[in-house]
Amino acid sequence: MLPDIRTPLPGPKSRALAARLRSVEARNVTFLPEDDSFPIFWESGDGCLITDVDGNRLLDMTSAFGVSALGHGTTAVTAAISEQSNRLLHGMGDVHPSLAKLELCEQLCQLSGLADAKVLLGTSGGDAVEAAIKTAILRTGKHRIVAFTGGYHGLNLGALNATARADFRMPFQRHLADFVTHLPYGEPVHTLPPDTAAVLVEVIQGRGGVQEISTEWLMNLRSLCDMTGALLIVDEVFTGFWRTGEVFAHRHHGVTPDIIACGKILGGGMPISACIGSGDAMSGWPVSTGESIHTSTFLGHPGGCAAASATLKALDAMDARTTVTRLGMYLRNHLDVLAIKHASKIIDIRGKGLMLGIQMDAPGAAVALSDALLQLGIITLPAGNGDVLELTPPFVVQEAQLDFVVTAIDQTLTA
Ligand SMILES: Cc1ncc(COP(=O)(O)O)c(C=O)c1O
């Protein structure tokens, strides 16, 4: 099925709801321009399609921030949530655990491929990154974290230290500790700063503009970590669980990390994340004596764990690796043709699997393209400097839907 737009976007109901939201939500959260030209309120989802409150049907090419790989609406995941919630929705994750938590940890250890893997669950990607940073500090006894320009690791005060973007950091600059060194992403790294506990890296930068690095570059980081005793943390929050074709993006490069931070796709739409480390990396955590030093109320939430287990099983059943690789190639080939046709406007097509970016010729150009696509019923997100259009559709996207998107981009750039 394709988009079906019945009202001007946003429609009258979306506009009315936006006015109500403006009066109750903290003003920094949702972009609510005075002219009511944004946003649309979502009502329901089915596969890659979202129906808004005005009855318009739109195509979601974002998986809602890269999460809904299995698509929206009723899936094996919603069935698992329903089943688990009828038995036990909430539990006491770090005191009296649930079977759902145990089973998820077992699945994650196995998928990670790390030696003697151990898991520390969280509820957001930022949580997973913070757990990874703490793990490295504890294991190495060192304090410095090396991260990279363009990197995005979350906005909690801990993770924000590693996130590079100035606009996120600036208002809180005085509250950010000086323990992160940002090096230029993808450029040669000859040495690590003294006292480096970990190198934290996205294998493909998502919000940074779908930026890729070479195998040699990642291998060099691995060697530098090995030489200095630092740990290699890969932030796979966006790239994890077959988004790029491999279960984790670092597998494309044959490099083994010490720690994997992951989230997004994992919960199938439920907020759950994980820091998975090798047994050695995780051995810095002291044995619990009854009071965990890193936990939270919702750690190991039974509903979230059941959703995550069902998500992993469903991705396995659909052969996500083959599906994403095939669909990614299909979209990539069409985008490459567009890039030739619109060579003055499209600078580059980047990414892997179903995580592709169209780099436009100017900052803000992808924002304008994204706005134009929305009017045609296609939901996308700009990334980077507003110069990259990010395409991360659900893995259930149909070729006809991808064709529709490519044609819409073509027409928009031709106009
Ligand atoms: C690579 C990466 N790390 C961490 C995060 C933070 O995840 P969350 O927003 O769930 O805290 C994101 C979110 O987009 C991300 O892309």
Image (spheres, grey):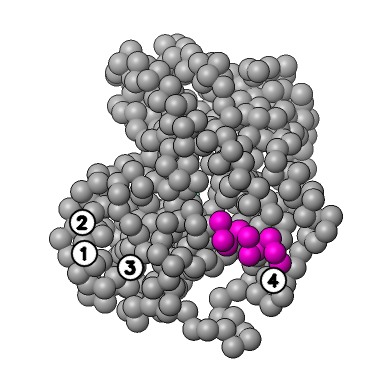
What residue does disc 2 label? 220
Give the spatial CA distance, label 4 vs label 3: 29 Å
* Label 2: which secondary element: helix
Does the magenta run of residues contain 103?
Answer: yes
* Residues in magenta, as a range: 98-107
Taking the spot 33% from the left edge, 63% from the top edge, the residue there is 232
* Label 4: which secondary element: loop
> Ligand 1 closer than 8 Å to the CB at disc 2?
no
Question: In this view, which residue lies farthest toward the left?
Answer: 190
What residue does disc 4 label? 97
Of circles 4 and 3, the one toward us is: 4
Residue 363 is situated, as x and y percent measured from the top left of the image, at 37, 35
Taking the spot 43% from the left edge, 39% from the top edge, the residue there is 244
Kind of residue sitting beneath label 2: Asn
Mark 4 or mark 3: name the one nearer the start of the chain.
Answer: 4
Mark 2 or mark 4: name the one nearer the start of the chain.
Answer: 4
Residue 68 is situated, as x and y percent measured from the top left of the image, at 60, 40
What residue does disc 1 label? 224
